[in-house]
Image: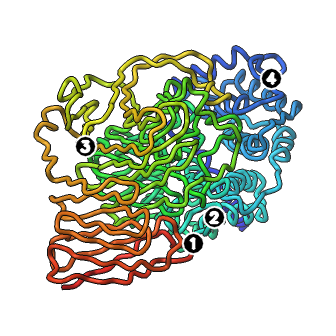
Amino acid sequence: MMCSLVKAQNEPFDSILQRINADLQLFVTDKVLTDEVSENLKQLNADGSWADINYADAQYDPLKRIKNMATAYIRPTNKLYNNAALHQAIVKALQNWLEKNPKNKNWWYNDIFYPQAIGQSLILMRSAKTKLPADLEEALIKRMIRRLKTGDGANTSDEALHFLYRACLTKNKATLDSAAKYLFEPIAVNEGKEGVQVDGSYYQHGKQQAIASYGRVFGANSVNAAFYLRGTAYALPKAQLAILVDYLKNTFLQTIRGAFYDFNVRGRGISRKDSLSSGIGGLIEKIRFFDPDNTAYWNASALRTSAKKAAAYGVIPAHKQYWKSNYTLHVRPGYTFSVQASSNRTLRTERGNNENILGKFLPDGATNIQREGSEYANLMPVWEWDKIPGTTSRDYHDDAGATIKSEWGILGTSKFVGGVADGVYGTSCYSLAYDSVQAKKAWFFFDREVVCLGAGIKSEAGESITTTVNQAWMRGAVDTAPKELSRAPFWVVHDSIGYIFPQGANVTISNEAQNGNWYRINHFQSKTELQHKVFKLWINHGTKPTDASYQYIVVPGTSAAGLKKYDQSMIHILKNTDQVQAVKHLGLNMLQAVFYQPGILAVDGISVQVDQACTVYIKGLNSKSPLLYIADPAQEQTAVHVELKLPGLSKPKSLNCNLPTGAFAGATASFKIKE
């Protein structure tokens, strides 16, 4: 009877603690861990400190080192298992931390990382043959105590995680109640507030797209919590499970190509080394324990993101326009293509804590083009930051012109930003008005290709204005035709991606080595000088253009031989002005158009007239029952009147198209047109 009572008192604390302990040891390689811990042991001072650590501004170390020491000590497979000298070192290092009580200028370390790291080391040592001294453990648990700030999205779940650690260490039900409540609190659709949005994107630090920065923290913490608490009275409720699964499946994991993130979703984290490496295999493995309904999807994702299968494995064609975050994601088995823009409804990609110092143009139509996935990984130290892929900007003398001068919360400047989508195809637009440059930029997404148009490009600035087509790792040869790039059309192929310029352009190709270091973009990173060969392709519009334009077609998954056979006649660029940009795809029988003002598109036997600025997409263009998709990028109109004359219709059609409003303003509305 007494045994049953003790067991009841220990549950679910012991089960959760054991799950956390096992989870902390996932993917540990004992030899690597032994070498690292052995070196840290040699460098440890007699008082338990390390000479190379500034304790007045401590960051991840020394707590990360102590956690690794604890991991090695408790693992029977490790050479340092149950090593008495190692145990003594762990005690000394923890005692030293306790006495020094470091404080960092960045609250995140003090309130999130420190208590989490302490809790992890204590949980690991609970399984040790020789425990930590009871008074030391008790003092460290008290040091973990922080006031939990609610309603702060990913940060709330981050803080609640160390509440969970403390609850299991102390077997305190009230603390566990709080931990479970606030771990799951962010799993909600928070219209206009930080967290998951109605379009499936994620906000943090105000209305700023943070899908794989803070959104990754949110996803990881939520999955961990659901994994740890499964099968207990604290298990994740079904309604919240649906929200979490939808975010992970239809947004977050879609931004990972192979094992690498789309750089457009990493926020200021783009300036950190290895920030595009996803490293989420273990996360996906856990999801399968509490969401068996999507096992096939999680299996394919785990294999793909761990590089056990090719980047195309299990990928289903999809296209999504995130109207809340001004982000477009176009996914095909053969490639991923995304666009990030900013509007006066959202915040630009932030600089914060002296991270992302040169990211001024990241939210100005940046295009991420991935095939294998690592096309941009760790290239950022040597990027030319006024030539971010996809952007139209001033060509500054040096990268100082790309400096973000204010930290946090800079509002976008454009009203007309968004697009239209049907889940598989779509078009996006960005009315650029920033840094003394104006342009109408649009992207038209099909299966084999993405058509990129720019019009009305003008500036009074002294620098030349350029549109960068791409800037990625130099890999292999660069093929062009014609070789002299003096006739239209011409094309360029590099790293299995083709770029066609139907009307020619003043194009420059560079495959030179570029220099830089991480510190110039992030003051927490290394000053070591780096040099990498970079493929860079851009269009020069000259100085003080008044009505310049560009058009190019991106064809991923091709070669020089393949591009020679590519049937460009399937693509008709119907219009490219500052009033209308439109493309017809003959093979797919569809028309996509951006109207920057009320007007008419009359060409190729087609007439589309609208009484409001909008984006329009017509599928089944020549059929007797075409589909019309329409959206308002400015998110102001409640209806658009459309007059249509289409080849498949015997007579003109007049439609009054009601548009989504409220939280769904900017979303796509669809209408079936009947003969």
Q: Amino acid at mark 1?
A: Pro
Q: Which residue is mark 1?
A: 237
Residues under labels 4 and 2: Cα distance? Answer: 37 Å
Question: Mark 4 — residue?
Answer: 48
Residue at the spot x=85%, y=47% of the render?
142
Residue 222 image position (x, y, % from top left): 58, 58
User: Callout 3, which amino acid?
Assistant: Val
Which label lies toward us, 1 or 4?
1
391 or 201: nearer the viewer: 391
Distance in Å between CA atoms under marks 3 and 1: 44 Å
**Residue ID at (72%, 21%):** 85
Query: What percent of the width, then of the height, locates residue 635?
Result: 52, 69
**Mark 2 — residue?**
184
Label 3: state its secondary structure. strand
CA separation, marks 1 and 4? 44 Å
- Specify the quadrant of the image occupied by residue 123: top right
Position of residue 386 measured from the top left corner of the image (x, y, whole percent): 51, 33
**Marking on residue 555:** 3
User: Alpha-carbon distance for marks 3 and 2?
Assistant: 42 Å
Secondary structure found at label 4: loop
Depth order, front residue of 239/89: 239
Tell me the crowding category of disc 3: few under 14, some 14 to 19, or many 20 or more residues within 10 angstroms, Cα based: many
- Crowd class of label 1 (few under 14; some 14 to 19; many from 20; radius 10 Å): few
Q: CA distance from mark 2 to mark 1?
A: 9 Å
